[in-house]
Structures are given as C-alpha cells and as structure tokens.
Amino acid sequence: QLQLVESGGGLVQPGGSLRLSCTASGFTLDYYAIGWFRQAPGKEREGVSCISSSGTNTNYADSVKGRFTISRDNAKNTVYLRMNSLKPEDTAVYYCAVGRHPYCSDYVPSDIRSWGQGTQVIVSS
C-alpha cells in the first residue's frame, strides 16, 4: 500500500531555513513526478514545487522561486524541499504528492495519485 510520510517541519524564525522530507513506502517513486503543496489557515491548498521522475526538471511557484529547492534521491525513495529565507507567509501545512506520470504540469505533478499527511511549518519570531 502506497504511503507518503512528510517530516522536517517545525518552528523557525523569519530568515531561517528548514528541509522537508517526503519518504514513500510500499511504492517506488522512481518513475513519477513528485510535488510539494501547502495550505495556510483559511486558504486553499496551493502548489509550491514539482520535480520530474529523473530530477532533471524542477518548477516553482513564483512565491518561492529563488528561496526553495526541490530535489530527490530515488535510492532512498525520498524527495526533499529545502526552504531558505523563510517568511511568515510561508507558514502552512506542507504536503507532498505523487503523480501518475513522470512529468510535472508546471509546478504540480500531473494527475495526483496519493498525498502525504502533511507537516506543519511555522515561521514566526
């Protein structure tokens, strides 16, 4: 059974950094695009970044471009989101999701098949 588990969230001061991880079990991520999403209180879930199956193509929402970096280690069945220069408006629950195809549709995976449970990120002084 496919399961995605996010980790690495927490409380960080503005300007700080965090690295989120998304590890899959019961399924190999090698052939699929993976994306990160976030949902802030009272707002809709939004796409943040996507990485293709090979890792050669990465895309980002304008709000995080230049600050966040997505990467993957297929040997560890894990995708990462490195978040630098964090701002209070980055506060949200962050989710990873796996698509059904190897490519991204802009900065989200195409045809999502499964979601993780989310990890909370709070950016506050």
Image (cartoon, helix red, strand yellow):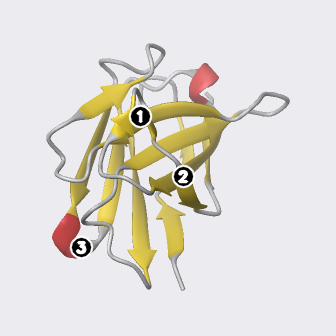
The residue nearer to you, when weighing 113 against 87, is 113
The answer to whether residue 9 is visible is no
Q: Position of residue 35 (x, y in %)?
A: 44, 45
Q: Identify which amino acid the numbered label 1 is placed on.
A: Ser
Mark 1–mark 3 CB contact (< 8 Å): no
Q: Quadrant of residue 23?
A: bottom left
Q: In the rendered view of the protein, which quadrant contains the C terminus?
A: top right
Residue under circle 3? 76
Tag 3 or tag 1, which sits nearer the N-term? 1
Tag 3 or tag 2, which sits nearer the N-term? 3
Q: Position of residue 99 (x, y in %)?
A: 45, 53
Give the SS element for disc 3: helix
Q: CA distance from mark 2 to mark 1?
A: 14 Å
Residue sitting at x 24%, y 47%: 71
Mark 2 or mark 3: which is in front? 2
Mark 2 or mark 1: which is in front? 2
Q: Identify which amino acid the numbered label 3 is placed on.
A: Lys
Q: CA distance from mark 1 to mark 3?
A: 20 Å
Q: Is residue 55 left or right of residue 103?
A: left
Q: In the rendered view of the protein, which quadrant contains the N terminus?
A: bottom right
The residue nearer to you, when weighing 108 against 9, is 108
Q: Position of residue 122 (x, y in %)?
A: 63, 39
Q: Identify which amino acid the numbered label 2 is placed on.
A: Ile
**Residue lying at the far top of the rendered structure:** 62
Q: Quadrant of residue 117?
A: bottom right
Residue under circle 2? 112
Give the SS element for disc 2: strand
Residue under circle 1? 49
Q: Which mark is residue 32?
A: none
Tag 1 or tag 2, which sits nearer the N-term? 1
Q: Is residue 66 left or right of residue 105?
A: left
Residue sitting at x 32%, y 65%: 78
